[in-house]
Each structure stands twice: as C-alpha cells, then as structure tokens.
Amino acid sequence: MLPDKDGPGVGGGQSSSEGEDPSVGLFREYLRLRTVHPDPDYDAALGFLGRMAEELGLPMKKFEVCPGRVVLVITWEGLNPVLKSILLNSHTDVVPVFQEHWKYDAFSAVKDAEGNIFGRGTQDMKCVTIQYIQAVRRLKAEGRRLLRTVHLMFVPDEEVGGQKGMETFVKHPEFNKLNIGFALDEGLANPGEAFTVFYGERNPWWITIHCPGSPGHGSRFVENTAAEKLHQIMNTFLGFREKEKQRLNTSECLTLGDVTTVNLTMLKGGVAYNVIPSEMDITFDLRIPPTVNLQEFERQIKAWCKEAGEDVTYEFAQKHMNQNMTSTEEKDPWWRAFSGACREMNVTLEKEIFPAATDSRFIRAVGIPAVGFSPMNQTPILLHDHNEFLNEQVFLRGIGIYERLIAELASVPPCPGEA
C-alpha cells in the first residue's frame, strides 16, 4: 500500500472550454490522457484522479497489487461506517486505436456541432469514471451525508483481462477492509430508449486444441494427418456455433448473453509447402452463459476431441468458472433500491447477462453482488470500435442518474447480519 492522500475541500477546478458545462470539460480532459495499451500512461491517470480526490476533499489510497499496476480508491465515509459499503468501480485503461479509421484524433476529445464527443474511452469507460466523480461532487455540494460508505475504485488493466488488477486485488486483505456490500461497474450503451443493466456475465474460455498426426510428403495421401483431425474439430465447433446462432436469431426472449458464442481465432501448423505437418493447433474463443452446466460442457469438448482422432488434446489459456449472478428480485434490498430509483427517474431497465467480460466477474466470484450499468441510452454501441463517441447530453444526464443511484444505494437500511 502506498501513502494516503487527503485533499482540501470540494472544489470546481474542472477544465472546460468557454461556455461548456464544466463536467463535459472534465470528461474531455480525462479522455485526452493516453491510457492506451500496450503502454498506458498510468501516471497521468493517477495524477488526474489524485487531483479529483483533492477537489472532493476525500482521502485516497493507492495499492500496487502487481508491479506497475496500481488500484486507486477514493473513500467517502458514511454516517455508519460499520455497515457494508457501496463500490463504484471503473477502469483507467483503454484499448488501442487504428487512427486511419477515425474522423478525429482518438485522444483529442473533439466535440462536433451535435455535441457528440469523439475519443477512445468515451463509452468504455472514462465516461462512467467522471460521472461517478461528478455525482459525488454534487451530493457533497448539497451537504448530503449518506448512511453507508462509498468507495470509488479505479483499476488499471481491465482491458487486458484484469489479472494484474481486480482479479488480484479481490484476494488482497485491503480489499476485504473495504467491507463492500454492493458494487456498480460498467455496462453497455443501448440504442433504444431503455437502459441496459447486467446482472451476470458469460464465462470466457480460451481453448487451444492440439491435433497430432502422421507427417509425410505433400504429394501423397497420408492417413491420420493432423489436418484431418483439425478439420473435424473445426467443423464440430463451428457447427455448434451455428446452432447457438440460430437459437439466438429465432427466439424473441434470448439476448446475446443467453447463448454460447464460438469463434475461431488462431490456426497454427506447418513448416513448408510440401511437408505434411506432424501437428496443428486450433484456438477458439468461447463465451458461455452462467446458466450452462460448465462441467458438462467440458465433457462435451472432451468427447469432440476423442471423436476427432487419436491423441487430440486441449488446454486452456483462460477458463473462468464463476456462475454467480446478482439478484434482481424486488425482495433483495440492493436491487430494490437500484430499480426503485430508476423507476422514480422514469429510467426503463432491460435486464441482461453481459455478453463479454468485465471486472464484475471477479467481484461476484467473492460473493459480492454487482451490476453492470452505464447510463447511455439512444446511443450506438461503440466500445472498442472506430469513432467511439458519446453525446454530451447523454453524458450529463448520466451524472444525475448516478447521483440518485448512489444516494439510494448508500441509504439502504441495515440488512440482517449487519451491525
């Protein structure tokens, strides 16, 4: 753990252009920080967030959970700090850009005449970071004191798997000291009027299947080749992919998070044009819903390998087995507070299983309920895409939504078992 940092009172030192809402100016300033892989400028992000802590007048702690990987936590202590706290999680890193496909420099945070702000991280997820900060700023400026403690957490490497960030930190004693009862993390934009909220995630399995076979000269019909085995594996996996795709396309009640996606991502093998290889590898990216029996699914994979031929084996580069889902029943106090606040704001929710992976999976894995929610409606889904953007009015409305959600969640009365 690195030293604490306490700042002065709430301030308004946001950067903005003349006539621009200060929150929008602050958002654009944060977007200009090049926290992009493979070499993110973490120091710039930590410096910026440290300034935010000073402006809010809140203590900040830094935890170097892995070399060069710092988790930063800003804490707003509640009236009863013994009660379970609320976590507002976001990540500082963003994915690479292909600048030739962008209208503007991806790190210039250009705002066009319609108020659309372009930049890497506008949706995933620098918007949420600033919305958290500005929502807390508003609550403090109003003189509010909340029952439960609120932690704003900023993690360093969600976009590369989270292994050196959240996955490690949830096992850290300092994470346990945060005493978290409920967490908010990132979601997705919704092109319609509703807002999407995610209560679970699919499990990512990255699997490589090794196909050994008889080598030989490229002029012969050699039996039992690696390519023949790989061909069967490919057909079997992609056949299953087609069935899941059809299941999604023919059902009105299923979303992408409810089915298993299968995508062939790498092929490896061969040494020369005229040499039949003695081994070939094929790699798939699988995303499996938490409703699937994962043990049974792996047994199916074993059977497919056996059917493909002798000595076909597999190994996982990533294999998540967490099937925890957050309750969305009205009897659950956390969900009741979240959904109730949304109803009062006329925010329509669409509940889904997240189709990809976020740091929420690590939070749920240690038994803490978490929902993924980014307040972006009437917005195309552009995370990781070229020309990622968010309209300033959608962004500003999101601050108000978080202001209400944070206040409601941090005011949930003591639950059974709490002091």
Image: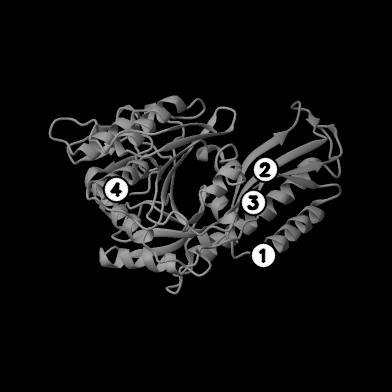
Q: Which numbered disc covers residue 96?
A: none
Q: Earlier in the sequence, mark 1 or mark 3?
A: 1
Q: Which numbered disc covers residue 135?
A: 4
The answer to whether residue 38 is left or right of residue 76 is right
In the displayed structure, would residue 251 be above or below residue 25?
below
**Quadrant of the frame with the N terminus:** top right
In the displayed structure, would residue 288 be above or below residue 381?
below
Residue 103 seen from this side: no
Which of the 4 quarters of the picture holds residue 344? Answer: bottom left
Q: Nearer the viewer, mark 4 or mark 2?
A: 4
Q: CA distance from mark 1 to mark 2?
A: 22 Å
Residue 258 seen from this side: yes
The answer to whether residue 265 is left or right of residue 337 is right
- Element type where label 2 sits in the image: strand
Q: Position of residue 108 (x, y in %)?
A: 30, 27
In the displayed structure, would residue 182 be above or below residue 119?
below
Q: Which residue is mark 2?
A: 283
Q: Position of residue 244 (x, y in %)?
A: 57, 61
> Disc 1 residue type?
Asn
Mark 4 vs 2: CB contact within 8 A: no
Q: Which residue is mark 3?
A: 320
Q: Earlier in the sequence, mark 4 or mark 3?
A: 4
> Disc 3 residue type?
His
**Residue at figure coordinates x 54%, y 57% from the top left:** 368
Q: Nearer the viewer, mark 3 or mark 2?
A: 3
Q: Earlier in the sequence, mark 3 or mark 2?
A: 2
Q: Earlier in the sequence, mark 1 or mark 4?
A: 4
Mark 1 vs 3: CB contact within 8 A: no
